[in-house]
Amino acid sequence: MFWTAGLHAQTSTTKPNIIIILTDDQGWGDLSINGNINLNTPNIDGLAKAGARFSHFFVSPVCSPTRAEFLTGRYHVRGGVYDTSAGGERLDLDETTIAQAFKSAGYTTAAYGKWHNGMQYPYHPNARGFDDFYGFCSGHWGDYFNPQLEHNGALVEGKGFIIDDLTDKALQHIESNKEKSFFLYLPYNTPHSPMQVPDRWWNKFKDKKLEMLSGDKTEDIQFTRAALAMCENIDWNVGRVMDKLKELRLEENTIVIYFHDNGPNSFRWNGGMKGRKGSTDEGGVRSPLFVRWPGKIEAGKEVKHIAAAIDLFPTLADLAGIDHSANKPTDGLSLKPLLLDKNPSWNDRPIFTHWNGRTSMRTQQYRLDHLGWLYDMQNDPGQLQDISNQRFAIAETYKKDVERWEKEVLSELPKVDGRLFSFGHPDGKYYQIPARDGKPHGNIKRSNRFPNSSFFTNWLSTEDRIKWEIDVVASGNFEVLLYYTCPQKDAGSTVELSFGNSKITGKVTEGHDPPLRGMEHDRVERMESYVKDFKPLKLGIMRFEKGKGPLTLKALDIPGSQVMDFRLLMFTRVEP
């Protein structure tokens, strides 16, 4: 399906506002409306009761692919998204996003939360159609209380618990744009680990007997309790958004969408479905989808047709009367007939899921898993019985469909090989070059095997170095800050940052050795890296000439036993 750029169908006074709420690692079963009596989510449930509820809505098995599919209406591999860190999460620049479409149609656009589709401009949300961005661009974050975040590229300190803070920004945006048409994207980052939540919600669950469990003997009950507490916090914040719409009398002219980015991040009750986050089975990719638009969408409507994240772009464009074309077809379809029509005409179609070399295919009745096993999802929703022998013709047809899809869609992935990190785009002012994106050499080690919120440590030798392969797209001058920690006894090292013929040096004159933190807020022990309060060291002004190559950080001398622990290089464009 193609869309044509521009907005002509509606005037600025009739265009509906759009609010999209996307949660991170929340399972289909983490809502009371889906039957989980362990928790209570009245505000999220209210979206379904006041609007449409999709029974079988599908996303990707992990974070960044689902976000890419929502943003483009296309399968994530078409947009070059093949990983969740180290650059593999970046959405290709020749993809047009839903925010760009709505911005071109006269909407104000904002995103508050976890982006996870590229950090350095022009992959940054400000370059992908969002006028205002507050949050973080990485895949996960190390602390949810007063964390270091960014606002339109500039580093800032968050206020309080991150989900409450993000919602505060959303409420401010709604208030400031109540006379305009706004497109507001709220990608919350919970209940993704680390499992942190304020006492108000944790106290309800910390000793609670859970009535519904996954049945898997490895289920971590404390983790489940923490996840449920985080989900109730999300629900409270969803209620705050809805209260603001009611207060400003914007309810009837605002479309609110709520969904999750993948299956649950642990074994916990999920309706008996097979699989969790990371799996291409039903439990790894089924999400709720609630669409509320009072006066337009019938309250309590249940849509039983299968749908997917790739459908949201064309659907919202259609509902808002936006004729949009990215010069590329969307893989998704407009769900407008299913939302608004009494007896919609709708044909069955396949929905494909791909992750980590595995492809699964879903139709209205069947799922073909990555092994080629066929399941009747209407009669066997838990995928307990392979019927590929009994339904041999269907299984063989679906296998050929998967082969054709992989041949067409996965063939677009090789173009991402060797992509460099973008730097120096003339429209960008700030550039973060974090440890996440670097490659250590020598003794240097990453603080954790999950790169997204990690730092580098064990920097012991002048032969050690950190490199980033970058593409300087335009020449320019940048002020450079280096974020570090170092015991006072080891202070004094001189470091050099170089790119091509340009070099800049700085000396660690002040020790700064704060303890690791994060564990004081964790409800269960985390898998990811703990964090520190890193100190900025001003290196000075560095000139970058257009070109490609390694950005290298090394030590010229080390008077103590180590150089530093390193977290981030922050570049700010300055006039020549």
Image (cartoon, rainbow, N blue to C red):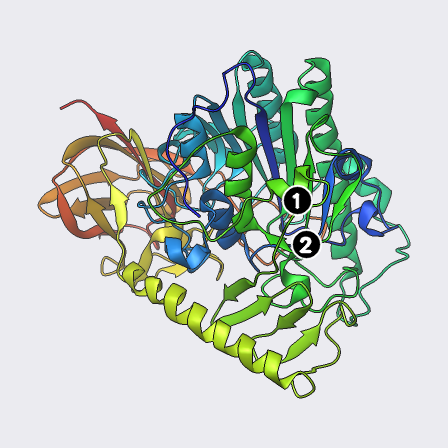
| Residue occupying the far left of the picture | 501
Q: Looking at the image, do the residues carrying marks 2 and 1 touch, with CB atoms under 8 Å apart?
A: yes
Q: Where the C terminus falls, by quadrant?
A: top left
Where in the figure is residue 327, as x and y percent of width and height?
Answer: 33, 44
Position above or below: 576 against 558:
above
Front residue of 338 and 16: 338
Residue 121 image-quadrant placement: top left
Where residue 503 appears, as percent x and y from the top left, is 14, 42
Label 1 SS: helix
In this view, the residue in front, 518 or 314, is: 314
Residue found 49% across the figure and 50% down from its top: 69
Would you call the spot at circle 1 few (<14 residues within 10 Å), some (14-19), or many (20 or more)?
A: many
Image location (x, y in percent) of residue 399? 52, 78
Q: From mark 2 to mark 1, how far is it between C-alphas?
A: 8 Å
Mark number, residue 338: 1
Kindly identify the amino acid type of the residue bearing the numbered disc 2. Answer: His
Q: Secondary structure beneath disc 2? A: loop
Horizontal relation, residue 358 to residue 78: left or right: right
Q: Image check: 344 left or right of 4?
A: right
Q: Is residue 443 visible?
A: no
Above or below 44: residue 84: below
What amino acid type is highlighted by mark number 1? Leu
Residue drawn at x 25%, y 39% is: 507
- Among the two numbered marks 2 and 1 on one chain, the one whose residue lies closer to the N terminus: 2
Determine whether 366 is above or below 29 in the image: below
- Residue placed at 64% from the left, 37% from the top? 257
Report the side of 544 relative to 109 (left or right): left
User: Where, by quadrant of the figure, is residue 394 drawn?
Assistant: bottom right
Q: Which residue is mark 2?
A: 305
**Foreground of the two, 446 or 189:** 189
